[in-house]
Image (tube, helix red, strand yellow):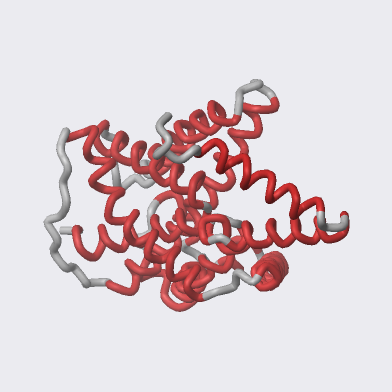
Amino acid sequence: MSDAEPDYEEEHENERALRSGEEAALTPEEQEEALEEQLRVEKRRYFNVSRSLAASFLFVLPLLAIYELGILTDISAAAVWVKAPISWLQRHPVEILGADTTVILNAVFIVLMVLAAWRLGRLGALRARTFLGMLTESGLYALLVGPIALFPLVGRWEFGPFTANFSHFWPKIVASCGAGVYEELLFRLLLMGIVVFLAKEVGGLRTFSAGLLALFVSGVVFSAAHFLSPAESPNYTAFMFRLVAGMIFGVIYLTRGFGIAAWTHALYDIYVLCFLAE
């Protein structure tokens, strides 16, 4: 090493020594407070906050509200657009669950919303820019889902063509919001969680291997579930496209959280129904 070259190792040693000296000057109570503050700052970082369940619950609230409003007002108009995995929700929830159960579930959901807002507020992370960033992410991912899912089938990237199709606009929005919330809740949050748990606890797999298995299983079930409707006959191309798309949603769920996965799914469906549908 020449005299002109900086000794980076020595600089790091000096920095570590200085930090150690500063920590040594603190009392145990002050060190504990400093560590807690450091953890609070880390939890407030965008990528940590945006993938948390607390932020996800608040972020999907507009999707759920739109879907519930749609099925309460005129679900018959939206029924044709509702995909098979959530077709059982075409009827009013009270008709399916009963009035008492519906009231209890709504109350639980409201409590979860309040707790989520309280937790984010306590961390100082309840900020509009966080949710704006999550919405921007979701929109970007939604535009990429189709081309990425098609690539293994056609061997090239395909975007568009874009053709506006706003007929039955409100039913399409309702169906898309419902698919975003309930399909991601069912196939990602619940199914992937169960598969990962069983793979680790029963199968003895490591976290990464369990995650890969969960991605594949949820993708297969997600794709197959779309053929529950008698209106669509099973075919290889559609099955493989939805399998890959389901795995993409799974990757988004694992890396960016339930909220962004749900919004990505909803925006993708809106994009397909309103801009690509014939």
Residue at the limit of the structure toward the bottom, as seen here: 73
Between 38 and 244, which is closer to the camera in this rendering? 38
For residue 218, side relative to residue 156 (left or right)? right
Query: Residue 92: x percent and y percent?
Result: 53, 68
Placement of 262 over or under 68, stated as above or below? above
Between 213 and 236, which is closer to the camera in this rendering? 213
- Quarter of the image that includes the C terminus: bottom left
Residue 71 in view, yes or no: no
Placement of 228 over or under 23, stated as above or below? above
For residue 41, side relative to residue 36 (left or right)? left
Q: Look at 29% across and 39% down and name the residue there.
A: 241
Picture quadrant where residue 3 is located: top left
Query: Residue 194: x percent and y percent?
Result: 62, 37
Residue 138 in view, yes or no: yes
Between 10 and 127, which is closer to the camera in this rendering? 10
- Quarter of the image that includes the N terminus: top left
Q: Look at 17% across and 42% down and name the residue there.
A: 157
Residue at the limit of the structure toward the right, as seen here: 28
Query: Residue 156: x percent and y percent?
Result: 15, 38
Query: Residue 66: x percent and y percent?
Result: 46, 73
